[in-house]
Amino acid sequence: MNAPVTPLAPALTPARERALVFVVAAVQFVNVLEFMIVMPLGPDFAQALGFQLDAVGYLGAAYTGAGAVAGLLGALLLDRFDRRRALVALMLGLVAATVLAGLARDLRELVAARLLAGAFGGPATSVSIAIVADLVPPARRGRAMAVVMGAFSVSSIVGVPAALELARLGGWAAPFFAVAALALLVTAFAGLALPAMTAHVAGAAVGPQGLRRLWGLVRRPEAALSLAAVGLSMVTIFLIVPNLSAYLQFNALWPRERLSVLYLFGGLASLALMTVAGRAVDRFGATPVVAFAAVCICGVVGVGILPGRPAIPTLLFFVLFMGSTSIRGVAVSALSSRVPPPDERAGYQSAQSAVQHLAGAIGALASTFVLVERPDKSLAGMEVLGACTIAGTLLVPLFARAVERRVRSREASIPPSAGSGGETEPAGP
């Protein structure tokens, strides 16, 4: 006879479930925005702080490298704590790191601030995903993940254009201070709105036992394959994205004063396509959606990066690039959320965050070795990065297919009475 499953969250009405998902999405919005503003503002930082454009990748590598280390530590610790308290503590650390970035006086200090931001921001993302997975049953999780990951698109639509204009009018540091203030407000709201979530703690393993349990989890075929899919996705993105602003401005000759237009339309496209992708994952499964996104990414990179400058209109290239990578992100995240059991979820998400950030750091660092700033400030070597992106992208659907087959086989073997259902518990007396 199967043991009863420990419920993970209070019983929620559909309206309450949606409201809490949007609260987590708001936290994720400021977390993503804090990360995203650095990449398009890279040329501004280089001019203000006196370093070369081909060093911008170090900023992305610092954040993602620190996120990788923090993710490994979080994988051993986060399942010991109330998810709400853990999220609030991590976001407060991110606020402090953001303020320090705005106070940086040179590249070294800015890199140090980005290291600190990654140490808090990476685990905060893991806890956010774990909260959604605890609150939302598998049948609706694809759409919920699309809402939370929609923070990426909303930050592109609203946050990044605003940050670009704020930097143009008020100086490169102004966006950091604005984001820190917004993050503080949203974090306070989330701390009040989210329920306490501690039921998972009873099954959590800590110390050496936790390390052995986590190692046992990530060694499972579906977990190892899922981490490989996530890692490849991040490497292929970070070969290009940290340098995309400089590429568009100096290779494609897109004006700096109109850079916010690209992020506005790119974000709108991503938001619309994420919603469609979430529904498609719920209906057809993750693998077909990942495969479709891979074809789109390869095509867009082929015409937008391989020639050394976009062979299609720059706005169209940017919109298609952001949209196709967003579709893949939703599908891979929804699939990976099905890999761990509930009491290992935050730990697994932290391990996944470590892989994501390590892969991002590898991609960003690799780009600094390949790229060379020409006298006219254009970047040589983007074609090489584009070819590597295409090669890695084509492998992701193969890993996704293997993960989905194993997860479905495991889920089919679990009797309905032993399943997680909505992963909720009855309301208290």
Image (cartoon, rainbow, N blue to C red):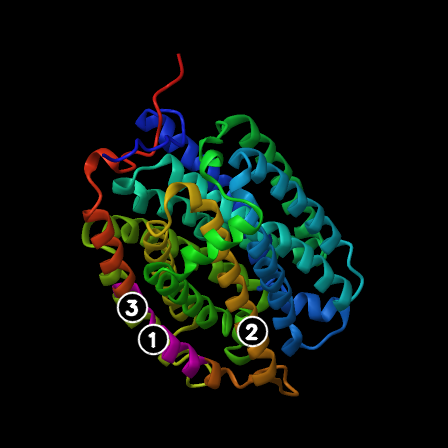
Q: Secondary structure at mark 3?
A: helix
Q: Quadrant of residue 4?
A: top left
Of the 4 image quadrants, the one containing the C terminus is top left
The label number, if any, that marks residue 298 in the structure image: 1
Q: Residue at x 29, y 61 (%)?
A: 403
Q: Residue furthest front?
A: 1
The label number, if any, that marks residue 397 in the structure image: 3
Query: Which amino acid type is marked by label 1?
Result: Cys
* Apparent side of residue 389 relative to residue 205 in the rendered image (left or right): left
Q: Which residues are magenta?
A: 386-401
Q: Where's residue 340, x and y in %? A: 37, 49
Q: Quadrant of residue 103?
A: bottom right
First along the sequence among labels 3 and 2: 2
| Residue nearer the viewer, 226 or 410 | 410
| Residue nearer the viewer, 274 or 198 | 198
Q: Where's residue 192, x and y in %? A: 55, 26
Q: Secondary structure at mark 1?
A: helix
